[in-house]
Image (spheres, grey):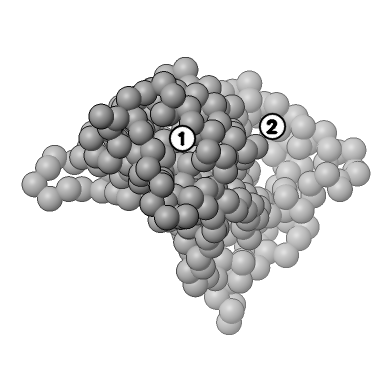
Amino acid sequence: MTDSGAISLNADDSARLEAAVEWFLRMRSGSAGVEELPEFQQWATSDPRNAAAYRQVSSTWASVGEHASAAEIVVARRDALEDARRAGGAVQPHLVSRRRFAAVAAIAATSSLAVGAWFITRREQSYSTGLGERRTLTLEDGSVVTLDARSRVTVRYSSRERQIALKEGQARFDVAKDALRPFRVHARNQTVVALGTQFNVEIVSGTVLVTLLEGHVAVSAASQRGAPAQAPVQIQPGQQLVVSPRHERQILTDIDVNRATAWQTGKMFFDNEPLGAAAERVNRYARQQIIVDPAVADVAVSGIFNTGDSGAFIEGITAYFPVRAEHLGTSEIRLSARR
């Protein structure tokens, strides 16, 4: 151990580096799932040098990137990933060429073996958007968070995990792979755990919606006093997990992911959406806020609207449903049952 707290590897750690490469390829392959995290973390935490070796391989692989021009490095990267894909993510020493592992491990041995400074715990940072504003954030690990209007997240990275809390609104997450630091998104009492993947999380009318666009996620719930613990739920691309304010879960299949993320291009799709929830989404963009009377909050509405065009939304609702609109000054409109 150095004075800075970094861990040094030496020539006797070649087997450890090789194991790190195996794990790196396994976690990087397209078929890797969150269910493999416990086994990986047990290996990584059983010896500090294991984690150091993994970080070394990961950072070196990234630094070689597209700038690698040496033929043997290009081939090693290509062939190692291809072997991992063919093995379905379960990379074993006898399935992947030792020569390829040696090539990648040799790459790892050529760069600095000091680790630790990169993983200093960061203080919590908060990001938000205002009325009608969308914002794209690129986090320090390369992950991208896209915030919908009137949305807020807090971000806290540490050496062990990446923590994001969606406090209100909606966000899309494009997660950079880092198996040493799981990416967790908290929304109300739900926690989404991801590897490298893409998903959308929304809080609307007390309901949490998690839509998987690509990759793998598992969603777990915080324990509720007096209630049995709920097992984590895994969803597949094109599925949406809906968690009600009463913590009831429902998985919707065959979700149109383009519609689920249409807010990024200024569109809102409603398909039998409760009027109260639909109005809450419209209010993220509208200067004239819509107040929905509880008597009509559950009216199911459908349609396609431009974000920020509350006038067209109100016109459509009052034309096709027994709902009337009442202007309350210049800043609010009340929707109630038509008499």
Q: Which label belongs to residue 139?
A: none
Please name the residue shown 51% across and 68% down the image: 125
Mark 1–mark 2 distance (CA, rounded to whole Å) = 53 Å
* Up-down relation of residue 239 to residue 177 (above or below): above
Image: 292 above or below 161: above
**Res 214 visible:** no
**Furthest residue toward top:** 254
* Residue on which disc 2 sits: 81
Q: How many marks?
A: 2
Residue 76 seen from this side: yes
Kindly identify which residue carries mark 1.
314
Using the image as rendered, state which of residue 27 and residue 338 is in the foreground.
338
Amino acid on which disc 1 is placed: Ile
Say left or right for 238 vs 227: right
Residue 90 horizontal/vertical position (percent): 53, 29
Give the quarter of the figure containing the C terminus: top left
